[in-house]
Amino acid sequence: MTQIAGLGALSVLVILSEVGLDASQFPTVKHFVSWLGLCPGSRITGGKVKSSKTRRVVNRAANAFRMAAQTLSRSQSALGAFYRRMKARLGGPKAITATAHKIARIFYHIWSKGDAYVDPGVDAYEQKYRERTFIQLQRKAQSLGFDLVPKPDIAECVSQ
């Protein structure tokens, strides 16, 4: 579990002391992050969203996940790149909560299934992000009646 970026031995011990060793008490990962208070709220009344803030929860495990997320600001991992992208878009506190939610989901899968975690790294994360953005732009252009054509690489133009 210490292979997850941001989680050290002490953080893992704090989390395990709070949640225990038996993962069956949380049927799904959604139940787990909801118990931690790291998932968005859904206060809806009359079809109108009143608030989507996270619930206020006094939980040492949630604090450990938040601390782990905060340490990723300069990390050269996929989670570090995710944190920096969220911080630029949402601001610091919301980025910490979003990253803590992601770390908690990874932790739950390791905790419940015993899988190993392999960090794909910043480059793989950035490449996947670029591909997702390109596909979204392509769909948007197609819905507006345009064709999106990628610009040829400069290296290809120089070699010809």
Image: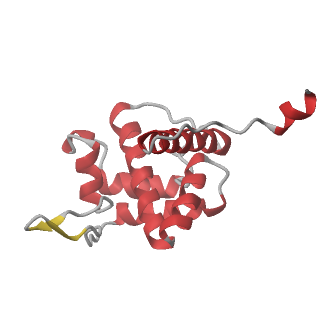
Q: Residue furthest right?
A: 159
Q: Is 149 left, or right, of 33 in this rendering?
A: right
Q: Residue at x 39, y 51 (%)?
A: 104
Residue for point 24% across, 64% down: 41
Image quarter of the C terminus = top right
Of 145 and 115, the residue lying toward us: 145
Colour convention: secondary structure
Relative height, residue 81 to residue 91 (above, below):
above
Using the rendered view, name the quadrant where residue 125 is placed: top right
Comparing 102 with 91, the one in front is 91
Task: Judge from the rendering whether residue 126 lies leftward or rightward of residue 46; answer left or right.
Answer: right
- Total numbered circles: 0
Return the x and y of residue 143 as percentages of the image width and height.
41, 42
Q: Residue furthest left?
A: 46
Q: Which one is in front, 152 or 21?
A: 152
Residue 52 percent across, percent down from the top left: 26, 67
For the residue pair 49 and 30, the one nearer the viewer reads as 49
Where is residue 59 shown, x and y percent of the image? 30, 66
| x and y, in percent, of residue 158 in the image | 91, 34
Q: Residue at x 92, y 28 (%)?
A: 159
Residue at the image point whose x is 49% and y is 43% from the top: 141
In the image, 159: left or right of 91?
right
**Most extreme residue toward the front, as rendered?**
145
The quadrant in which residue 47 appears is: bottom left
